[in-house]
Image (spheres, rainbow, N blue to C red):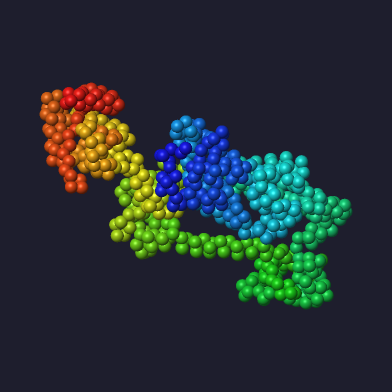
Amino acid sequence: MMSSIYSMDLLNLLFKNSNDAVFFMEKINGKYRYIFVNDAAVNLINTNPCGKTIEQVIPSHLAKTIIHYYDLTIEQNRQVEFEDFTYGKMNVRKQRTTTIPVIQDGKNYILAMTKEVSMSLDLEDKYLFMRSIFSNSFLSTILVSNDLQLLEANPTFLEEFNIQMEDASGISMLDMPFIERKTAKKLKSYINRARLGENVQSKMLFFIDKHNERRCFTASFSSLTSNGENIAVFIILQEITEFIKQGQALRTASHGLEMFKNAINSLADVIFTDVDGNIIDINERVIENTGYTHDELIGKPHHILHSTYLSDSASMSFWQKVSKEEIWREEVCNRKKNGEIYWVDSTMIPLKNELGEVEQFLMVQYNISSEKQLMSELYIIERNFRAITENTNDFIVVTDRYGKIKYASPSYSRKLGYREEELIGLPYDRLLKPESVKLWHEALNPETVDVIQEQKIELLLYKKDNSTIWTEGNYTLTFALSHHEITEIVMVSREITERKELEDKLTYLAYHDSLTQLGNRRKLYKEFPLLKKEADETGTCLAILYLDGDNFKEVNDIYGHDVGDEFLIQFGNSLVRSVRNEDLVIRLGGDEFLIVLTGLSIFEKERSVQLVHIMDRIKENLQIGWLIRGSHFSPTASMGISIYPKHSISLDVLIDLADQALYKAKQSSN
């Protein structure tokens, strides 16, 4: 049965509405069984796993990692943090999990809290960049995890090799039917090299397609990383089967010029014109790419292919080059016969006869529509990023090397109440409470932080109305290698005021008695070393005053537990009124209380006078008493005292000695 310390009601109270995913599980026979999960956890794994084991809920390659860290947490009996990544059809998530061991009555439990972590812009941009470019590309692209699982593939790859992603789950890519044995060994080597940061490009691999035909590809491997950590390997496959066949055919040819011509024809549109720009010959690629027939183009001016005439600047450049018999090059927007437009990188080369006179022009055009599309995609990414930045609730700020604000997202104005012009140029530490200024200045010092890794920081900010909010941010230093100095600090933060308030509340509950609101035994053991240090530094003594209310049981028996609880509250309040603010009043349990008296004289006679005065004041306040539901109570209490450092320097020994003195006092009074 679950310990009352972690009852279901308490777990729901603490974590039900948490934005972080929270799991509480028990280790039984080497397996971890889910006992409690909050709503965020259900949303994260798309199921309620209570009653099931990790292996029944989580994919095997992820479960293996999770179980490793859970076992480490219990074996070392300490908090452990780890990060992992999950991939979906439309996104990639980075998560940080904190695990806390709970050992109760010989049973092992794990409390795990998982939060989604904002990936670095480099990782996210690279992932989106690769997806946007290659999703509908004729190239085959795949994403492979560190344990060689096939995480994602574009439609071209899935179609060519007849793969269903659902069937690929949990299977090593090297064991899939389209991989040859020789290819598997090479593929594994290339992936491992890419994971280690090597630039692995243009490696030839053979795969078996859905028709059981052997096809040749060149493969490029790119490491997908975050904060210096390899996450996965992105592989781009470009089929070269036909090129291989063409190469074999070319090697049988005897004439080098014919070989060159075939190569050009396979890559570019080739157009010959006369000196007036009229087309006199074309290669097959022009016919294939434009939709015109040979006869429809021969004799026509070359700009029949242009979607519009050249811009004035491009036209001027063209005629200047032509008049000087120089090579002209420009990007040109062409139009096919069906009206579809496409972009080409066009080069015009003058061809001279044996007399050195230009008699023809050779125009070589490479289709760059994909590159233009890429630029368009990048523009969209930039525009979307700006839209996200301008509308997010996160705090995004860019400062110079001295911490002066260069850019602040609108959330600073919305949540802090400042106008944009008030923020630009303002030192960021002007927004911070004094206790956060030191942390911020340390962040600006490259000698105290890792200039490569992203860093985390919690800061307390002033609003314009002088109220405060807590933020948790990740910041990165932009470092100029040329002169070894910081150029910018980029920080993305989010408000955590509610979380900090909850942490403060939980801390208070951990160190205070829930009934009387006095400090508890944990509070005593936390504060005593500080009180002892102060006494040593000031040359004073401490007294442990152990108190036990007389005949408290009769109050419960006669008036009931509700009155008994209120009696204990008033008893504690009376003790607090009887001592100074610097003294510590603790409820140990039941009607047992303990007071740590500070600043007492090291001389016994003087100290005795001080103690008698304090105990008399306690007795007087108890004698005055209090009313509860019309009944007046004026209780008495027995007390026992021990002195630090006279009797001991150990708190446990001092408590035991004071308890013994209390017992003797009760015996003598009886």
Q: Which residue is drawn at 21% across and 36% down?
A: 583
Q: Quadrant of residue 52?
A: top right
Task: Name, please, the residue furthest toward the front.
Answer: 558
Which of the pair 85/579 is nearer the observer? 579
User: Horizontally, is 595 left or right of 494 in the view?
Assistant: left
x, y percentage for residue 376? 60, 64
Where residue 116 sits: x, y (%)? Answer: 50, 50
Write down the quadrant of residue 301 in the picture.
bottom right
**Residue drawn at (72%, 65%), measured in percent from left and top?**
365
Which of 202 and 230 lies nearest the eye of the viewer?
230
Residue 367 visible in this rendered orientation of the protein: yes
* Residue 565 seen in the figure: no
Residue 17 sits above or below residue 574 on the image:
below
482 left or right, relative to 639:
right
Residue sitting at x 20%, y 24%:
667
Q: Is residue 254 left or right of residue 525?
A: right
The x, y position of residue 48, in whole percent, is 54, 49
Residue 160 vs residue 106, the one in the foreground: 106
Relative height, residue 447 to residue 536 (above, below): below
Number of numbered labels in the structure image:
0
Residue at x-position 43% and y-position 42%:
7
Image position, residue 165 (x, y; %): 68, 52
* Above or below for 436 versus 71: below
